[in-house]
Amino acid sequence: MTRLSLGTLGTCPPDVARPAYDPAAHGVGIVHLGCGAFHRAHQAVATDAALASKGGDWRIAAVSLRSSEIADAMAPQDGLFTLIEKGQGGPKARIVGSVAKVMAASRDIDPVLGALADPATKIVSLTVTEKAYGIDRAQGDIDESHPSIAADLQNPHAPTGVLGLVVEGLRRRFDAGTAPFTVLCCDNLPDNGDLVRTGVVAFARRLDGELAERIAAKVAFPSSMVDRITPAATVETLQLAESLTGLVDEAAIETEPFFQWVIEDRFCEGRPDWEAGGALFVADVAPYERMKLRMLNGAHSMLAYAGFLAGHAYVRDVMTDAALSALVRRHLAAAADTLPDLPGIDLKIYADELAKRFENPSIAHRTYQIAMDGSEKLPQRIVAPALDALSRGQSIRPFAFAVAAWMRYCLGRTDSGETYDRRDPREAQIARVVEQAGGDASRLVTGLLALGGVFDSRFAEDRSVRANILSLLEAMMTDGMARALSAETAA
Ligand code: CS2
């Protein structure tokens, strides 16, 4: 079979959309850290539309930070990949041409640093997941015990972590008299622009006070809210891409039709016409970000823990479980109640649309995938809305339920006794708490609530929060998740 590439692109059947521009005619203007499925389904697609609409040197040099797999997959394809949209009707394929190349940082960091320092680079965007930053969110500082922060502070001119790379890139630019790039965080973190700014400036301050001041004064860190449900690609994804396009594509991805990107329009050196791809530019992203983190992501985390333990491999299966889907809707409503009004958005309609997206029968989104890195996700998804619910006198039960499900998941074994890997950056601490609790729900609650940086003390020390979590966790541990779910819906 023939491999997808610029040379073979023309052989695709006519119903496969192709770049409406000549990819090779556009230079690179963006370095993107983190070339996972989400980036390819989101920023790369919006950039593809921007290139088609207004052109410009805005192609993307993507960086894969840990593995070299995606770099190896995309090199023979000239950076092209197939995006398969799965909504109502059959799957639709589109070839995306905005990624010029993918560099594997773990193999060779020099080209990455070269791209960061290149005057042609105007934007450095990021989808690296919550845990990659190494920011101590409670203290508003870097976490010096984070492995890549610790390594990069030791060796700042040959960094491998996110903050180290951004700071070294900016240092090289300032030294060469080059204007700084804009740093655009696209991870699911609250106030993500300010948060990354705090981390970058704090990291730079450890190295050089003057550099830190220049970054603080000159670099733009717009916040952005990103949304598109994109499961990890599987062998079936690649097979489907081949059957739709007639070409072998090792980097194909599948995603839902829905796309949302809300961005603060503060860029130091210009930006692509991302509006052409559906992006919305606003003065303040925070209300959109909170809505999405609390409703979509909060419900996702809750249903991932409860669903995985109730035997549901995929989100769509969760939505066919009457008890659990009722709890998903309860969670969406409770999260909506913690939010201020957002002009033009009806949160009830948004909640209904989310439930429909979760139900999408053609998207195979694993609950186990969403369950990953819970200790990094719960603060903004569950704890923050719970604190608002507490201060408004609203019920905290749905949030306590989500935390209890996570705690139950932390035990690392299903109701039938099968073990699984927790996959959390705080694995060692969680394992210690679980071991010391020895199957006692109360000790488990106490130990996990005390994990550093996860639960705000106002949440952890609230008597009703603790009592609700404990009774729910006891029910989950004694009766099993399926019965606990029915009991909770009946309550
Ligand atoms: C999910 C998100 O894995 C997760 O934690 O909640 O990746 C979610 O699918 C996206 O944020 C949707 O935009």
Image (cartoon, helix red, strand yellow):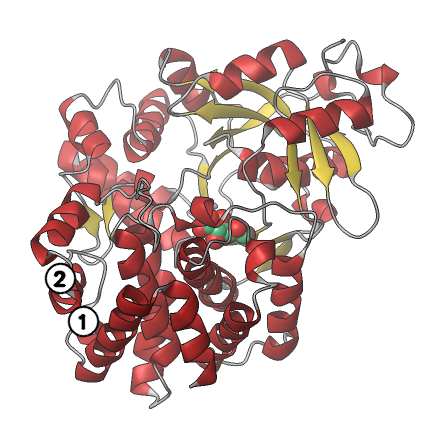
Circle 1: residue type: Ala
Quadrant of the frame with the C terminus? bottom left
Residue 404 is marked as none
Query: What residue is pinned by disc 1?
Result: 460
Residue ID at (19%, 32%): 147
Point out the tag, 2 or 1, that comes first from the N-terminus. Answer: 2
Residue 407 locus on image (x, y percent): 27, 60
Residue 275 locus on image (x, y percent): 69, 49
Circle 2: residue type: Ala
Residue 168 locus on image (x, y percent): 30, 26
Query: What residue is pinned by disc 2?
Result: 450
Q: Is the residue 38 above or below the residue 56 in the image?
A: below
Task: Answer whether residue 96 is visible to the viewer in this image.
Answer: no
Q: Secondary structure at mark 2?
A: loop
Q: Residue furthest front?
A: 416
Which residue is nearer to you in this view: 311 or 40? 311
Which residue is nearer to you in this view: 89 or 71? 89
Q: Secondary structure at mark 1?
A: helix
Judge the density around disc 2: few (<14), some (14-19), many (≥20) Cα neighbours within 10 Å.
some
Residue 25 locus on image (x, y percent): 73, 18
Judge the density around disc 1: few (<14), some (14-19), many (≥20) Cα neighbours within 10 Å.
some
Quadrant of the frame with the N terminus? top right
Q: Residue furthest left?
A: 436
- Contact between marks 2 and 1 (CB within 8 A): the answer is yes
Task: Answer whether residue 177 is visible to the viewer in this image.
Answer: yes
Label 1 C-beta lies within 8 Å of the nearest ligand 1 atom: no
Residue ID at (21%, 33%): 149
Count the numbered circles shown.
2
- Left or right, 235 with respect to 62, comes to right
Q: Is the residue 205 above or below the residue 279 in the image?
A: above
